[in-house]
Amino acid sequence: GGQRGGQRGGQRGGQQRGQGGQQRDDQHGGGEPTGRVVVGVHPVREVLRAGGRLDRVLVDVGRGDGSAIDEIGELAAQARVRVERVDRDQIEHHAAGLVHQGVVALGPPFPYVGLAEVLARTERQDRPALLVALDGITDPHNVGSIARSAEAVGADALIMPSRRAAGVTATVEKAAAGALAHLDVVRVPNLVRALKDAKQTGCWVVGLAAGTGNDIADTELLAESLVLVIGSEGNGLAHLTGLECDLLVELPMRGSVSSLNASVAASVALYEVLRQRDRQ
Protein backbone atom coordinates (compact mmCIF):
# COMPACT_ATOMS: atom_id res chain seq x y z
CA GLY A 1 0.00 0.00 0.00
CA GLY A 2 0.96 3.65 0.30
CA GLN A 3 2.94 3.12 3.49
CA ARG A 4 5.04 0.50 1.80
CA GLY A 5 5.62 2.66 -1.25
CA GLY A 6 6.77 5.60 0.83
CA GLN A 7 9.06 3.47 2.93
CA ARG A 8 10.56 1.91 -0.17
CA GLY A 9 11.37 5.31 -1.62
CA GLY A 10 13.26 6.24 1.54
CA GLN A 11 15.16 2.97 1.57
CA ARG A 12 16.08 3.38 -2.10
CA GLY A 13 17.44 6.87 -1.53
CA GLY A 14 19.95 5.81 1.10
CA GLN A 15 21.17 2.52 -0.27
CA GLN A 16 24.32 1.77 -2.22
CA ARG A 17 24.10 -0.22 -5.44
CA GLY A 18 27.11 -2.41 -4.76
CA GLN A 19 27.32 -5.28 -7.22
CA GLY A 20 30.07 -7.30 -5.58
CA GLY A 21 28.82 -10.75 -4.57
CA GLN A 22 28.60 -11.92 -0.99
CA GLN A 23 28.47 -15.55 -2.02
CA ARG A 24 30.56 -18.07 -3.85
CA ASP A 25 29.08 -20.02 -6.77
CA ASP A 26 31.29 -22.76 -8.08
CA GLN A 27 29.80 -22.54 -11.58
CA HIS A 28 29.16 -26.22 -12.08
CA GLY A 29 26.37 -26.54 -14.57
CA GLY A 30 24.01 -29.44 -15.18
CA GLY A 31 21.59 -30.20 -18.00
CA GLU A 32 17.95 -30.72 -17.20
CA PRO A 33 16.62 -34.26 -17.61
CA THR A 34 13.52 -34.97 -19.66
CA GLY A 35 12.00 -36.71 -16.64
CA ARG A 36 12.47 -36.48 -12.90
CA VAL A 37 15.23 -38.57 -11.33
CA VAL A 38 15.33 -38.65 -7.53
CA VAL A 39 18.40 -40.31 -6.03
CA GLY A 40 18.90 -41.63 -2.51
CA VAL A 41 16.79 -42.91 0.35
CA HIS A 42 15.89 -39.61 1.98
CA PRO A 43 14.95 -37.63 -1.18
CA VAL A 44 12.84 -40.53 -2.52
CA ARG A 45 11.10 -41.01 0.82
CA GLU A 46 10.28 -37.28 1.07
CA VAL A 47 8.80 -37.14 -2.43
CA LEU A 48 6.57 -40.11 -1.58
CA ARG A 49 5.62 -38.62 1.78
CA ALA A 50 4.66 -35.35 0.12
CA GLY A 51 2.50 -37.07 -2.48
CA GLY A 52 4.74 -36.17 -5.40
CA ARG A 53 4.18 -37.98 -8.67
CA LEU A 54 6.54 -40.85 -9.38
CA ASP A 55 6.32 -43.70 -11.87
CA ARG A 56 8.77 -46.20 -10.42
CA VAL A 57 11.05 -46.71 -7.46
CA LEU A 58 14.10 -48.81 -8.25
CA VAL A 59 15.84 -50.64 -5.41
CA ASP A 60 19.17 -52.46 -5.72
CA VAL A 61 18.43 -56.18 -5.68
CA GLY A 62 21.53 -56.66 -3.55
CA ARG A 63 20.31 -54.34 -0.81
CA GLY A 64 18.68 -56.07 2.11
CA ASP A 65 15.42 -54.94 3.62
CA GLY A 66 15.53 -52.47 6.48
CA SER A 67 13.43 -49.79 8.08
CA ALA A 68 14.17 -47.19 5.37
CA ILE A 69 13.46 -49.58 2.48
CA ASP A 70 10.37 -50.90 4.24
CA GLU A 71 9.07 -47.36 4.70
CA ILE A 72 9.69 -46.52 1.05
CA GLY A 73 7.84 -49.68 0.06
CA GLU A 74 4.86 -48.78 2.26
CA LEU A 75 4.73 -45.20 0.99
CA ALA A 76 5.02 -46.37 -2.61
CA ALA A 77 2.18 -48.86 -2.10
CA GLN A 78 -0.04 -46.11 -0.68
CA ALA A 79 0.77 -43.91 -3.68
CA ARG A 80 0.32 -46.82 -6.11
CA VAL A 81 3.89 -46.47 -7.31
CA ARG A 82 5.53 -49.73 -8.20
CA VAL A 83 8.81 -50.77 -6.61
CA GLU A 84 11.21 -52.79 -8.74
CA ARG A 85 14.23 -54.77 -7.60
CA VAL A 86 16.92 -54.23 -10.23
CA ASP A 87 20.63 -54.82 -10.74
CA ARG A 88 23.04 -52.31 -9.26
CA ASP A 89 24.19 -51.35 -12.77
CA GLN A 90 20.71 -50.05 -13.55
CA ILE A 91 20.63 -48.02 -10.34
CA GLU A 92 24.03 -46.51 -11.12
CA HIS A 93 22.97 -45.71 -14.67
CA HIS A 94 20.10 -43.54 -13.46
CA ALA A 95 22.06 -42.14 -10.49
CA ALA A 96 24.75 -40.83 -12.88
CA GLY A 97 27.50 -40.73 -10.27
CA LEU A 98 25.41 -39.53 -7.31
CA VAL A 99 25.46 -41.42 -4.01
CA HIS A 100 22.30 -43.49 -4.34
CA GLN A 101 22.19 -45.86 -1.32
CA GLY A 102 20.64 -48.40 -3.64
CA VAL A 103 17.50 -46.36 -4.33
CA VAL A 104 16.44 -44.27 -7.33
CA ALA A 105 12.96 -43.04 -8.31
CA LEU A 106 11.80 -42.04 -11.78
CA GLY A 107 8.85 -39.86 -12.68
CA PRO A 108 7.51 -37.05 -14.86
CA PRO A 109 9.41 -33.75 -15.07
CA PHE A 110 9.80 -31.74 -11.88
CA PRO A 111 6.53 -29.89 -11.11
CA TYR A 112 7.36 -26.21 -11.16
CA VAL A 113 4.69 -23.85 -9.80
CA GLY A 114 3.52 -20.62 -11.42
CA LEU A 115 4.54 -17.32 -9.86
CA ALA A 116 0.99 -15.96 -9.95
CA GLU A 117 -0.23 -18.97 -7.98
CA VAL A 118 2.44 -18.50 -5.30
CA LEU A 119 1.85 -14.76 -4.98
CA ALA A 120 -1.91 -15.21 -4.74
CA ARG A 121 -1.46 -17.73 -1.95
CA THR A 122 0.95 -15.56 0.02
CA GLU A 123 -1.44 -12.62 -0.22
CA ARG A 124 -4.14 -14.73 1.47
CA GLN A 125 -2.03 -16.15 4.27
CA ASP A 126 -1.96 -14.59 7.75
CA ARG A 127 1.83 -14.25 7.99
CA PRO A 128 4.45 -12.31 6.00
CA ALA A 129 5.56 -13.95 2.80
CA LEU A 130 9.12 -15.22 2.41
CA LEU A 131 10.33 -15.93 -1.12
CA VAL A 132 13.94 -16.74 -2.03
CA ALA A 133 15.12 -15.71 -5.50
CA LEU A 134 18.32 -16.96 -7.12
CA ASP A 135 20.26 -14.73 -9.50
CA GLY A 136 23.03 -16.40 -11.45
CA ILE A 137 23.39 -19.43 -9.17
CA THR A 138 24.51 -22.11 -11.64
CA ASP A 139 26.04 -24.71 -9.31
CA PRO A 140 23.35 -27.36 -8.68
CA HIS A 141 24.84 -28.17 -5.27
CA ASN A 142 24.38 -24.54 -4.21
CA VAL A 143 20.81 -24.51 -5.54
CA GLY A 144 19.96 -27.67 -3.62
CA SER A 145 21.56 -26.45 -0.41
CA ILE A 146 19.77 -23.09 -0.62
CA ALA A 147 16.49 -24.91 -1.19
CA ARG A 148 17.16 -27.00 1.91
CA SER A 149 17.76 -23.90 4.05
CA ALA A 150 14.75 -22.11 2.55
CA GLU A 151 12.44 -25.00 3.38
CA ALA A 152 13.94 -25.31 6.87
CA VAL A 153 13.00 -21.72 7.76
CA GLY A 154 9.52 -22.04 6.27
CA ALA A 155 9.96 -20.11 3.01
CA ASP A 156 6.96 -20.07 0.71
CA ALA A 157 8.83 -20.67 -2.54
CA LEU A 158 12.13 -20.63 -4.39
CA ILE A 159 12.26 -18.46 -7.53
CA MET A 160 14.85 -19.06 -10.22
CA PRO A 161 15.24 -17.68 -13.74
CA SER A 162 15.06 -20.02 -16.71
CA ARG A 163 18.45 -18.83 -17.97
CA ARG A 164 21.78 -18.36 -16.20
CA ALA A 165 20.64 -20.66 -13.41
CA ALA A 166 20.52 -24.33 -12.54
CA GLY A 167 17.07 -25.87 -12.82
CA VAL A 168 15.95 -28.74 -10.63
CA THR A 169 18.05 -31.75 -11.60
CA ALA A 170 18.87 -35.00 -9.83
CA THR A 171 21.94 -33.30 -8.36
CA VAL A 172 19.86 -30.41 -7.04
CA GLU A 173 17.34 -32.77 -5.44
CA LYS A 174 20.11 -34.81 -3.87
CA ALA A 175 21.73 -31.70 -2.38
CA ALA A 176 18.34 -30.54 -1.12
CA ALA A 177 17.97 -33.83 0.82
CA GLY A 178 14.23 -34.04 0.29
CA ALA A 179 13.42 -30.35 0.85
CA LEU A 180 12.15 -29.89 -2.71
CA ALA A 181 9.34 -32.30 -1.98
CA HIS A 182 7.92 -29.67 0.39
CA LEU A 183 8.97 -26.37 -1.24
CA ASP A 184 7.36 -24.76 -4.27
CA VAL A 185 9.82 -23.89 -7.03
CA VAL A 186 9.03 -21.20 -9.59
CA ARG A 187 10.92 -20.76 -12.86
CA VAL A 188 10.54 -17.40 -14.53
CA PRO A 189 11.74 -16.14 -17.92
CA ASN A 190 12.68 -12.76 -16.45
CA LEU A 191 13.72 -12.41 -12.81
CA VAL A 192 13.41 -8.62 -12.76
CA ARG A 193 9.82 -8.88 -14.01
CA ALA A 194 9.11 -11.45 -11.30
CA LEU A 195 10.47 -9.10 -8.64
CA LYS A 196 8.24 -6.33 -9.94
CA ASP A 197 5.24 -8.67 -9.74
CA ALA A 198 6.12 -9.60 -6.15
CA LYS A 199 6.26 -5.91 -5.23
CA GLN A 200 2.76 -5.45 -6.58
CA THR A 201 1.51 -7.95 -3.97
CA GLY A 202 3.22 -6.11 -1.10
CA CYS A 203 6.64 -7.77 -0.95
CA TRP A 204 9.86 -5.89 -0.33
CA VAL A 205 12.88 -7.03 -2.34
CA VAL A 206 16.16 -7.29 -0.44
CA GLY A 207 19.34 -8.34 -2.23
CA LEU A 208 22.36 -9.95 -0.56
CA ALA A 209 25.56 -8.36 -1.86
CA ALA A 210 28.94 -7.35 -0.45
CA GLY A 211 30.13 -3.80 -0.06
CA THR A 212 26.76 -2.19 0.61
CA GLY A 213 27.50 -0.93 4.12
CA ASN A 214 24.08 -2.21 5.24
CA ASP A 215 24.37 -4.96 7.87
CA ILE A 216 21.57 -7.48 7.40
CA ALA A 217 21.01 -7.57 11.18
CA ASP A 218 20.01 -3.90 11.09
CA THR A 219 17.42 -4.43 8.36
CA GLU A 220 13.90 -3.98 9.70
CA LEU A 221 12.36 -5.12 6.41
CA LEU A 222 13.15 -8.77 7.17
CA ALA A 223 10.03 -9.09 9.29
CA GLU A 224 7.84 -7.85 6.40
CA SER A 225 6.68 -9.77 3.33
CA LEU A 226 9.96 -10.29 1.55
CA VAL A 227 11.81 -11.58 -1.48
CA LEU A 228 15.42 -12.32 -0.51
CA VAL A 229 17.64 -12.32 -3.61
CA ILE A 230 20.85 -14.36 -3.59
CA GLY A 231 23.57 -13.79 -6.20
CA SER A 232 26.91 -15.42 -6.99
CA GLU A 233 30.29 -14.37 -5.66
CA GLY A 234 31.98 -13.89 -9.00
CA ASN A 235 29.34 -11.65 -10.56
CA GLY A 236 27.16 -10.67 -7.61
CA LEU A 237 23.64 -9.61 -8.46
CA ALA A 238 23.01 -8.73 -12.07
CA HIS A 239 22.90 -4.97 -12.58
CA LEU A 240 19.16 -4.82 -13.33
CA THR A 241 18.41 -7.15 -10.43
CA GLY A 242 20.30 -4.89 -8.06
CA LEU A 243 18.41 -1.86 -9.35
CA GLU A 244 15.11 -3.61 -8.66
CA CYS A 245 16.02 -4.31 -5.03
CA ASP A 246 14.55 -2.02 -2.41
CA LEU A 247 17.66 -2.54 -0.30
CA LEU A 248 21.03 -4.25 -0.66
CA VAL A 249 22.45 -5.80 2.49
CA GLU A 250 25.56 -7.74 3.45
CA LEU A 251 26.71 -10.20 6.06
CA PRO A 252 29.32 -8.86 8.50
CA MET A 253 32.78 -10.25 7.71
CA ARG A 254 35.47 -10.03 10.40
CA GLY A 255 38.11 -12.42 9.08
CA SER A 256 40.54 -12.34 6.19
CA VAL A 257 38.25 -14.20 3.79
CA SER A 258 36.01 -11.71 2.01
CA SER A 259 33.23 -13.97 0.74
CA LEU A 260 31.17 -17.04 1.54
CA ASN A 261 29.82 -19.89 -0.52
CA ALA A 262 26.40 -18.94 -1.95
CA SER A 263 24.54 -21.58 0.00
CA VAL A 264 26.29 -20.74 3.28
CA ALA A 265 25.57 -17.03 2.88
CA ALA A 266 21.95 -17.76 2.00
CA SER A 267 21.55 -19.95 5.07
CA VAL A 268 22.97 -17.30 7.39
CA ALA A 269 20.73 -14.64 5.85
CA LEU A 270 17.62 -16.84 6.05
CA TYR A 271 18.19 -17.59 9.70
CA GLU A 272 18.55 -13.88 10.37
CA VAL A 273 15.14 -13.46 8.72
CA LEU A 274 13.74 -16.21 10.94
CA ARG A 275 15.33 -14.70 14.07
CA GLN A 276 13.77 -11.32 13.43
CA ARG A 277 10.36 -12.78 12.64
CA ASP A 278 10.37 -14.92 15.78
CA ARG A 279 10.90 -11.74 17.82
CA GLN A 280 7.69 -10.18 16.49
Image (spheres, rainbow, N blue to C red):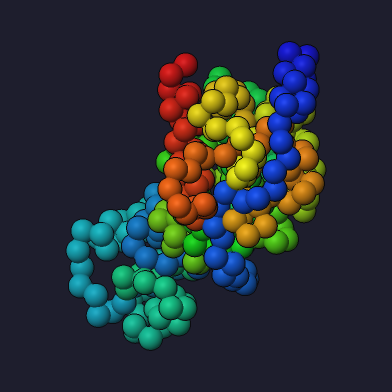
User: In front here: 11 or 34?
Assistant: 11
- Residue shown at 19% from the left, 63% from the top: 66
Residue 49 visible in the current orientation: yes
- Residue shown at 56% from the left, 60% from the top: 25
Quarter of the image for the N terminus: give it: top right
Farthest top residue? 3
Q: Is residue 17 left or right of residue 280?
A: right
Farthest front residue? 256
The x and y percentages for residue 28 are: 57, 70
User: In front here: 138 or 257?
Assistant: 257
The x and y percentages for residue 197 are: 77, 35
The x and y percentages for residue 246 are: 71, 31
Tell me where residue 199 sits by quadrant.
top right
- Residue shown at 31% from the left, 70% from the top: 101
The x and y percentages for residue 241 are: 74, 45
Tell me where residue 102 sits by quadrant.
bottom left
Q: Is residue 15 left or right of residue 251?
A: right
User: In front here: 198 or 238?
Assistant: 238
- Residue shown at 61% from the left, 35% from the top: 213
Tell me where residue 122 sits by quadrant.
top right
Residue 187 visible in the current orientation: no
Image vertical order of residue 87 relative to residue 129, above or below: below
Image vertical order of residue 251 relative to residue 75, above or below: above
Q: Is residue 199 left or right of residue 121?
A: right
Image vertical order of residue 186 relative to residue 99, above or below: above
